[in-house]
Amino acid sequence: MNASSAYGATNKARISSVIPAFLAAVPVLATAFPLPVGAVADFKTVSPLPASILTGYSTAQTFRSPSALFVDRKRGDIWVADSGNRQIVGFDPQGAPHLQFTHRSVDPDTGEAAPAEPVSVAVDGAGQVFVTDGASDRIAMYDYRGRLIKRVALARLLGVERACPRWLRVDRNDNLYVADVDVLRLVVLNRDQELVRVVDLKRPAGVGSGAQGSGGEKEQPFQVISAMDVGSDGKIYLLNSTDYPCVRVLDPTGKELIAFGDIDAGRDNFVRPVAIVSIDDGTFWVADAGLNIVKQFAGDGKYQQYIGGGPGTRPGEMRVPVALATDGSERLCVAERGTHRVQVFSLR
């Protein structure tokens, strides 16, 4: 099923019919759904209740629309891009805030810097914090104390007229991955912010041996990049919130390995997929803001389980999950726009 031509009134009616169909197929949304029959539980599962919940920097200042997350695997810190407050906040592994600063973006016309809503955040091994806001073609780079080091002009670096850096991730070699959502390409920079390679996503990607979908369906050009992650093995995870395939997994060179998921009913489909993150055991999680759940999939794209449910505000319930992050083995973090909080789940 293709949703690109029906995302107006028709798509609203379609989504409203999807939700009851999905709920009818599962027993209880407030707990983790059991593994499908025949699945092998050789991966970490997750507790249906969070180990901790972050609601703000203090009792006096709470989150206002947390929009992006990143877990520093070297230090265990959790980073939150709090768009409503135009803040970047770092929490230590115990959940205590240790850094807070205002993100500023440069106006492309006047050259003046002003507070802006951050949309993505990533941290490298040296503790340098990278932030995008979608308002300019620049990636802001801050030190571990929140002081601006420089702004990387992506269009100038690539030698092109325009660029729109949006999603950020840092791999284990401290390479910075940037999703340019306007031109549909992935840009990889080294730890000195020098260009390593560019993966062009406008062309149909070569199809690997993924089991999901037919080859003809998978050989489609990318239309939108709604979210992005990079696995510990270098695989690239991309999400499309509006059309088939919703999930695409690429090898480090950009070759497509699997592609699946539509805006439709079913365990392998979604209502409004908005975030994706990979775990070191080869599985990955997708946040569905339309169903208020986060689904886990095996490396081959087969559905495994989910957490969340609602919409609700109790621990373990979710209301519009919009961002995911993980340390790869022990914690899964979920930011919710509807409750202005971050739930931290323990992988086990």
Image (tube, rainbow, N blue to C red):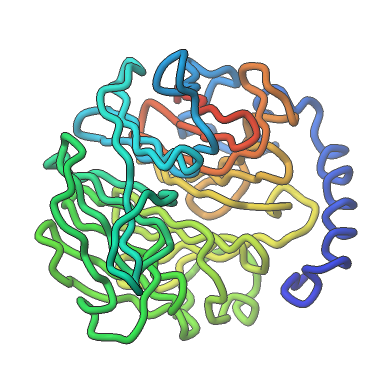
Q: Is residue 234 above or below residue 232?
A: below
Q: Is residue 43 left or right of residue 161?
A: right
Where is the N terminus found, in terms of image quarters?
A: bottom right
Asked whether the viewer can see residue 30, the reply is: yes
At horizontal 58% and vertical 17% (from top left) the residue drawn is 49
At horizontal 49% and vertical 69% (from top left) the residue drawn is 209
Q: Is residue 88 above or below residue 117?
A: above
Q: Is residue 149 left or right of residue 178?
A: left
Residue 297 point in image, percent of width and height:
56, 45
At horizontal 32% and vertical 51% (from top left) the residue drawn is 104
State how many labels appear: 0
Q: Is residue 209 above or below residue 46?
A: below
Residue 109 point in image, percent of width and height:
35, 74
Residue 344 point in image, percent of width and height:
47, 24
Q: Nearer the viewer, residue 210 or 82?
A: 82
At horizontal 53% and vertical 19% (from top left) the residue drawn is 50
Q: Nearer the viewer, residue 248 or 130?
A: 130
Asked whether the viewer can see residue 345, the reply is: no
Q: Is residue 279 left or right of residue 312?
A: left
Residue 258 point in image, percent of width and height:
51, 64
Where is the C terminus found, in terms of image quarters?
A: top left
Q: Is residue 205 left or right of residue 200?
A: right
Q: Is residue 164 above or below residue 57?
A: below
